[in-house]
Image (tube, rainbow, N blue to C red):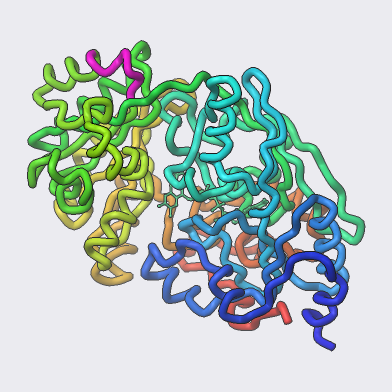
């Protein structure tokens, strides 16, 4: 009997799917955003899709898979856009989506199972005590909190609270290790690094404790400008106005808002560049004054839209972060994107310099954030893709100009990040996953300890072709 057949009988009583078409569908994430990852990963599929309903069931699956040497790739709802949840070596995709209870809410803190949908957590905390999560990804309505911690980094709220890596933005993660006798660890403080943004390569998160803040009735606003750099300078000004309460602050250069934000199209002229923001109701008039003083106009505010009008509109955060790319892709499937850091304090002049170099080949899309007390911005610029070679060249030119790229055309932790291994995660993986069965192929230092990131080569995981699962 094959390892997979043995596993199926060992796991009797736990929800398992082995229909190859369904398993393949459940083995996908948003890797296809990248033309390069699409080519590399299109064929990837697990052998089994397993959906435990409790931590005890997770432990049973881990024990059995460890014994059978079958890899496990944890999964929330598969909205990652770096191919994080793609099971490169086959085996089991372990869905946490059925472990979705919001377990307790108190002042400033929510405890939830890892598979809880982020938007559902916020609904529960709002109804309970007028609180909401500090941070959520623009995929909050579909993504899980465990997947956000393991595969994401920040998003809505980062203009006020920084990112998930910042101390205080995650309070506790409970994780199951991949050992003969799996351990259940409650990680706090510095130990959170072991599983935070580790793509599930070091442990399976089953429960999280997250900080809450007071919920506001956020108003979605669009400010329109004739040119993108005026919009950027205005957003930078708004970002620094500490008394102006905001949850989200993005700039999308024209003509993208009119071309791609189809349901908001009537609010923006063809060439408008737009600030898309979430502002506290009592701060909207201050926001409008700054916008007007800097030569823009308030083009849309959700609290003035009629009920009928509002019904058809997505929240503005679903136009921001990677949703901008998604909306562009729906209109023009040939575009792709990059994730760029414009470091403080020269982020505005760097944005301008790079916009002058690339023009319409790389349209500007910025997300303003406050990291370590400083305002800066991430670029999630669209790229009018022509060839892989040109895409690599664009990456190189950004980096040569002092703008690090978090390359979304790479599926490994290191290459999609700062081109270096997180030593804490590597050391923890050695003890928590000694056989290297958790999400194989995603941590270069584990697969090839001598790999030279300065070589300029792309890391290729051998297991993609070999498929060690079955
Ligand atoms: P998945 O995609 O299922 O998994 C992500 C990674 O975490 C995988 O490596 C998986 O193996 C691992 N994982 C999942 N669950 C667990 C677990 N319980 N234990 C251990 N490992 C686990 N990201 C942001 O940070 N901010 C954004 O604003 C944002 N916007 C996005 C917009 C769009 C349109 C898209 C397509 C993606 C966006 N993302 C963003 C990426 C992604 O949606 C988020 O990070 C999301 O929170 C991932 O959650 P998920 O449940 O879909 O995780």
Q: Is residue 449 above or below residue 148?
A: below
Q: In the image, which residues are magenta?
A: 279-285
Residue 281 inside the magenta-drawn segment: yes
> Tag count in the figure?
0
* Most foreground residue, 377 or 300: 300
Q: Residue placed at 69% from the left, 74% from the top?
A: 48
Q: Is residue 377 above or below residue 238?
A: below
Q: Looking at the image, which residue is at 81% across and 68% down? A: 65
Taking the magenta stretch, the answer to whether it contains residue 229 is no
In-image side of 4 versus 303 (left or right): right
On screen, residue 283 versus residue 419, left or right, reads left
Q: Residue furthest top?
A: 243
What percent of the width, then of the height, locates residue 383?
26, 58
* Residue 402 visible in the picture: no
Q: Quadrant of the N terminus?
A: bottom right
Front residue (pair 167, 16): 16
Specify whether residue 260 is in view.
yes
Is 158 placed left or right of 234 in the picture? Answer: right
Q: How far across and how far down the image is residue 70, in percent? A: 77, 72
Q: Quadrant of residue 299?
A: top left
Q: Nearer the viewer, residue 87 or 206?
A: 206
Instruction: Give the percent coordinates (x, y) of residue 410.
Output: 47, 62
Q: Position of residue 436 (x, y in %)?
A: 75, 64
User: Where 160 sits versus 124, above or below?
Assistant: above
Where on the picture, by quarter, is residue 228? top left
User: Is most of the magenta stretch helix, strand or loop?
Assistant: helix
Please identify the quadrant where the C terminus is shown: bottom right
Identify which residue is drawn at 9% across, 24% down. 295
Q: Would you identify the image quadrant in which residue 47 lies?
A: bottom right
Please report the residue visible at 27 percent of the width from the left and 34 percent of the height from the top. 307
Q: Residue furthest bottom?
A: 1
């Amino acid at each position: 009997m094959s390892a997979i057949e043995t596993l199926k009988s060992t796991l009797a009583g736990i929800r398992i799917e082995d229909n190859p078409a369904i398993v393949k569908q459940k083995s996908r994430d948003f890797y296809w955003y990248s033309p390069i990852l699409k080519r590399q990963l299109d064929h990837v599929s697990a052998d089994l899709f397993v959906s435990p309903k409790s931590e005890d069931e997770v432990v049973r699956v881990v024990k059995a898979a460890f014994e059978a040497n079958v890899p496990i790739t944890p999964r929330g709802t598969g909205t990652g856009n770096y191919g994080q949840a793609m099971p490169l070596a086959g085996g089991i995709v372990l869905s946490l989506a059925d472990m979705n209870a919001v377990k307790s809410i108190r002042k400033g803190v929510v405890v939830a199972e890892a598979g809880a949908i982020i938007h559902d957590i916020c609904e529960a905390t709002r109804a309970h005590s007028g609180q909401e999560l500090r941070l959520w990804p623009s995929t909050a309505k579909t993504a899980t909190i465990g997947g956000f911690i393991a595969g994401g980094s920040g998003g809505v709220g980062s203009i006020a609270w920084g990112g998930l890596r910042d101390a205080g933005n995650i309070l506790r993660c409970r994780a199951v290790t991949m050992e003969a006798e799996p351990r259940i660890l409650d990680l706090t403080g510095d130990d959170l690094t072991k599983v935070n943004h580790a793509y599930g390569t070091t442990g399976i998160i089953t429960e999280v404790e997250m900080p809450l803040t007071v919920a506001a009735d956020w108003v979605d606003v669009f400010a329109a400008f004739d040119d993108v750099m005026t919009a950027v300078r205005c957003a930078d000004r708004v970002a620094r106005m500490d008394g102006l309460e905001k949850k989200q602050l993005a700039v999308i250069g024209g003509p993208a808002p009119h071309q791609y934000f189809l349901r908001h199209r009537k609010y923006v002229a063809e060439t408008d560049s737009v600030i898309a923001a979430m502002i506290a109701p009592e701060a909207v008039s201050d926001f409008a004054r700054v916008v007007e003083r800097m030569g823009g106009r308030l083009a849309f505010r959700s609290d003035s839209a009629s009920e009928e009008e509002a019904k058809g509109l997505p929240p503005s955060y679903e136009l921001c972060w990677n949703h901008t790319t998604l909306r562009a892709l729906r209109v023009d499937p040939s575009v792709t994107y990059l994730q760029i850091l414009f470091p403080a304090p020269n982020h505005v002049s760097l944005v301008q310099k790079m916009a002058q170099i690339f023009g319409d080949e790389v349209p500007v899309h910025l997300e303003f954030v406050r990291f370590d007390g400083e305002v800066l911005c991430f670029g999630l610029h669209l790229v009018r893709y022509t060839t892989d070679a040109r895409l690599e060249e664009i990456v190189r030119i950004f980096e040569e100009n002092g703008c690090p790229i978090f390359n979304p055309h790479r599926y490994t932790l290191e290459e999609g990040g700062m081109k270096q291994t997180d030593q804490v995660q590597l050391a923890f993986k050695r003890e928590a996953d000694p056989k290297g069965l958790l999400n194989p192929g995603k941590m270069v230092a584990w697969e090839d300890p001598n790999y030279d990131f300065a070589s300029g080569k792309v890391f290729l995981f051998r297991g993609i072709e070999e498929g060690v699962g079955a």
